[in-house]
Image (cartoon, rainbow, N blue to C red):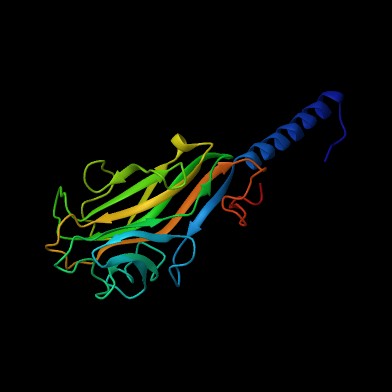
Amino acid sequence: FFTTGTMENIYKQLVVVVIIIGMTGIQHAHAQCILFSEDFASSFGSQFTSTGNTGGSAWGFTNSCSASNLSGHSGPGSVIFQGTTVPCQFGNSTSTVSGNLNSPIINISSAGTSTLNFNYYLLNECTGTCANDKLSVGISTNGGGAYTTIMDSYLTGGLAPTSGAWVAKSYNLSAYAGQNIMVRFSFNSVNCTANAFDGVYIDDVTITATAGPAMPSAIAGSAWVCMNTSA
């Protein structure tokens, strides 16, 4: 690598080597990693759970409802909140329906800047600001004992009351740095009328982070996947 020449030239070449090594180290320390990922490619899978369901509807897998084959997600597979007897429709015209889609506990304690990412599709009776057929996203830091709403389609904001297309969303999780978290997607029709709609689809849920090389598993038994493996 070094060329012959004066001591001054050799010193300059040494400085270049040090800078290159330093830049490589910085790149490695800031590798982009996937802490958690679920794309519901062919099934509901085993990572998420469907809980708190009321009115005869629940979260389940679909690859054939109306939004399944639309662009904007990794489809056709996704999850949808739907009736247990009437698929691809959340309501039954007799009951208010609601339910939660819960992630496992995810370890972001050693992450740098972490971000929640997901795609959603919301089809309901709403045409503007709407208190019905609500989607919300919450974060828990105590194993699901309590959740803080970070975005919703009504009061908190961040989600459209109705989307009519797949929408990509991201949320900075810096407020939860150094903790274990759970993510919950919740749907609530609020009433039992005008509910013959698809409702909500969720897909491509990931948590990504900028983290150092010494990284624990995000979930027991699974390793963090670094996208910048050349760093």
Side (left or right) of 169 relative to 17? left
Instruction: Name the residue at 64% across, 36% down.
Output: 26
Residue 166 in sight from this viewpoint: no
In the rendered view, tell whether residue 114 sits above or below residue 8. Answer: below
Instruction: Specify the quadrant of the image occupied by residue 64.
Output: bottom left
Residue 204 in percent (x, y) is at 43, 59
**The N terminus: image quadrant:** top right
Q: Residue at x 62, y 57 (%)?
A: 221
Q: 53 left or right of 114?
A: left
Q: Residue at the far left: name it.
A: 193
Q: Position of residue 36 (x, y in %)?
A: 52, 53
Tell me residue 108's x, y (percent): 54, 43
Residue ID at (76%, 35%): 17
Residue 133 x/y as whole percent: 20, 56
Number of numbered tags placed on the structure image: 0
Would residue 18 be found to the left or right of residue 226 on screen?
A: right
Who's the residue at 36% across and 73% down the image?
Answer: 63
**Above or below, 95 relative to 142:** below
The answer to whether one can see residue 167 in this image is yes
State the residue lying farthest toward the top: 8
Q: Is residue 161 left or right of residue 63?
A: left
Whether residue 173 is situated above or below residue 229 in the rendered picture? above
Observer-nearest of 69 and 107: 107
